Image (cartoon, coloured by chain):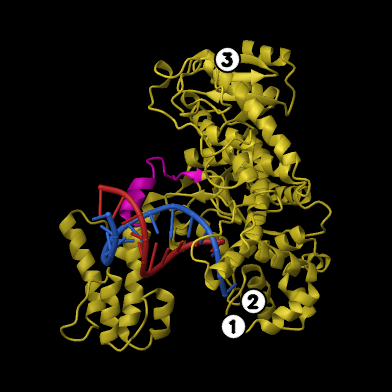
Chain colours: A yellow, B red, C blue
DNA sequence: GATTTCACGTA
DNA sequence: CGTACGTGAAATCC
């Protein structure tokens, strides 16, 4: 293909930065070694295979556009994702990113005008994205820019310039040697997100409806039928109410009054609070059951299925590579908070299996790695990290676990004082790391995760002692949760890359858990690959830190089969 | 009509 | 233990 030859002529080699801008039209603007070039989707796909450059895109939106055209890039540099890493916060449009890199005043960034741009803008707007004031010109950043060949290639060229500035910025983070590698995996995670959004999670509609029917009855055919069904559910609770007393169960205030009538006096009606009164009055137990069904009926009911489960049996939501705080992946459409009972409906397609794997005790292991605590790293050689920790502390396992988790999350209540002292003595390096994060956050100083993600701490407002303490906990948690998210994404994008030749595709990411959809005959190979990828990612991520990471991996047909091996002595997995 | 509060699902 | 997210309905604000 012509374009491929031209990229070759430009001397593009594996890993070189090549700008890529996709507009609404079929042509894609490229910039390779300063040369402007236009290509179709097929040429980009071919160039990706043969030359494997690092495509520079302005944001995951480009990845989504390409995925819709059947192009799945191997790797990229996602400017928006790297911006969030380098500077923190959520906003990452080109004008914002550029102003940060050029150290221009943020308050005077020119606002995007009306979307008719090139016709009625300033002179020069058409030719050059950078204005005389140094800012990006509004018509270029507003997204509605012209898809003319000149604009596409110029925009691609500017992307490369911007990426180079970001690389220089990351290189200046002398005490964050993993920042560049993190930028790579965060970028690839954006490609993964575009694919997750496009592909969806396999779900069997019949099974899903069966699960729903068991909780809230069959799908109502009319609004009257739905109302009857609701009334029947309500009646099951209200029949326990004293004569004459009633309440709209959907109104917390009315529920609270109703509870008072039966002698249950509570400040709010949250489930964890009501559980203590479960045996006090039959209405309480009935109410808790009602809440469960109501949650399913409203949030994860037939309406939810209709909205998010496609004709093709795929449950779709929109994925983002990093949330506002610590950088975990998020998904809409209920993909991240689907009730566990619905996992029965997550079924592999015919001829396929799921390989699901979750990281074991990820947070204390991450703490050992990022803090460089030799003693805690030693404990990670055990499959159950809390066993050697308990021995070291001279306490039982549950106590050790609560102490470690409490230290990581900034425990405020309870009986951890003595265990905490022992913890500080046994693992002083790790504890100092957490304390420092806590102190910095309390003081309103910004933090940076192990991988270099900036966590912006905004002090201000009512500085009550409680607010300051909450900020300390937030900071403490952000460094652990954030670093865990970085390792997880490195693992996920490694699986994405290595799994592609097997036809194995990631269909769900759940903070410490991966679900990979693979041809049945590749199930075993995929399971091994998932484990190998964890070791590969861990070596890269925590080189020389002697920290062991483990995953629990299984091959299943439906998601709910995964935890079937859990015996009565097992506890629920940690966050 | 938009925003806040309550509640609850997941990790 | 404590943190994060997305969601939906009611309550509240304007």
- The residue segment tinted magenta is A300-319
**N-term-proximal mark, 1 vs 2:** 2
Do dots 3 and 1 share one subunit?
yes
The residue sitting at 20% across, 53% down in the picture is: A221
Which of the numbered marks, if any, corresponds to residue A157?
none
Mark 2 highlights which residue?
A402
x, y percent for residue A450:
71, 53
Residue A67 seen in the figure: yes
Which of the numbered marks, if any, corresponds to residue A414?
1
Is there CB contact under 8 Å for labels 1 and 2? yes
| Image quadrant containing the N terminus of chain A | top right
The one nearer the camera, A542 or A230, is A542
Secondary structure at badge 1 equals: loop
3D distance between C-alphas at marks 3 and 1: 64 Å
Residue A575 seen in the figure: no
3D distance between C-alphas at marks 2 and 3: 58 Å
x, y percent for residue A347:
48, 51
Q: Is residue A140 magenta?
A: no
x, y percent for residue A499:
65, 41
């Amino acid at each position: 293909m012509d374009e491929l030859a031209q990229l070759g002529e430009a001397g593009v080699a594996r890993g070189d930065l090549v700008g890529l801008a996709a507009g609404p039209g079929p042509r894609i603007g490229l910039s390779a070694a300063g040369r402007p070039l236009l290509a179709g989707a097929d040429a980009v796909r071919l160039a990706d295979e043969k030359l494997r450059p690092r495509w520079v895109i302005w944001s995951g939106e480009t990845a989504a556009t390409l995925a819709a055209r059947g192009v799945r890039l191997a790797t990229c540099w996602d400017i928006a994702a790297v911006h969030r890493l380098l500077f923190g916060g959520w906003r990452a449009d080109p004008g914002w990113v550029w102003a940060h890199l050029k150290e221009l005043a943020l308050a005077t960034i020119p606002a995007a005008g009306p979307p008719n741009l090139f016709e009625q803008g300033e002179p020069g707007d058409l030719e050059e994205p950078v204005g005389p004031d140094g800012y990006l010109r509004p018509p270029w950043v507003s997204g509605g820019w012209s898809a003319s060949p000149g604009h596409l290639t110029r925009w691609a060229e500017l992307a490369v310039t911007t990426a180079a500035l970001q690389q220089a910025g990351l290189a200046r983070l002398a005490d964050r040697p993993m920042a560049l590698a993190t930028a790579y995996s965060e970028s690839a995670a954006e490609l993964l997100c575009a694919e997750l959004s496009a592909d969806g999670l396999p779900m069997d509609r019949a099974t899903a409806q069966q699960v729903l029917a068991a909780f809230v009855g069959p799908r109502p055919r009319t609004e009257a039928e739905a109302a009857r069904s609701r009334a029947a559910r309500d009646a099951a609770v209200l029949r326990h109410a004293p004569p004459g007393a009633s309440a709209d169960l959907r109104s917390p205030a009315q529920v609270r009054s109703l509870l008072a009538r039966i002698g249950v006096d509570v400040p709010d009606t949250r489930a964890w609070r009501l559980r203590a009164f479960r045996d006090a009055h039959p209405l309480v137990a009935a109410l808790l059951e009602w809440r469960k069904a109501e949650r399913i009926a409203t949030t994860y009911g037939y309406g939810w299925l209709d909205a998010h489960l496609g004709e093709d049996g795929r449950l779709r939501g929109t994925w983002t590579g990093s949330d506002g705080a610590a950088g975990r992946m998020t998904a809409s459409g209920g993909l991240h908070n689907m009730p566990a009972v619905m996992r029965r409906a997550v079924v592999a397609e015919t001829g396929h299996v799921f390989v699901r794997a979750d990281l074991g005790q990820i947070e204390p292991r991450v703490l050992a790695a990022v803090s460089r605590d030799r003693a805690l790293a030693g404990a990670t050689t055990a499959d159950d990290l809390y066993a050697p920790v308990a021995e070291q502390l001279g306490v039982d396992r549950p106590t050790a676990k609560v102490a470690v988790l409490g230290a990581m999350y900034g425990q405020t209540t309870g009986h951890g004082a003595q265990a905490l002292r022992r913890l500080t003595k046994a693992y002083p390096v790790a504890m100092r790391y957490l304390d420092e994060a806590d102190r910095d956050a309390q003081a309103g100083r910004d933090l940076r995760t192990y991988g270099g993600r900036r966590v912006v701490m905004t002090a201000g407002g009512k500085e009550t002692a409680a607010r300051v303490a909450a900020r300390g906990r937030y900071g403490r948690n952000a460094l652990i949760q954030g670093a865990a998210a970085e390792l997880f994404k490195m693992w996920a994008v490694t699986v994405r890359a290595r799994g592609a030749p097997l036809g194995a595709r990631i269909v769900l990411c759940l903070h410490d858990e991966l679900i990979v959809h693979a041809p049945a005959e590749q199930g075993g190979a995929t399971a091994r690959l998932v484990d190998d990828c964890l070791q590969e990612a861990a070596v890269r991520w925590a080189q020389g830190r002697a920290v062991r990471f483990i995953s629990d991996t299984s091959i299943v047909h439906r998601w709910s089969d995964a935890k079937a091996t859990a015996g009565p002595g097992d506890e629920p997995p940690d966050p």
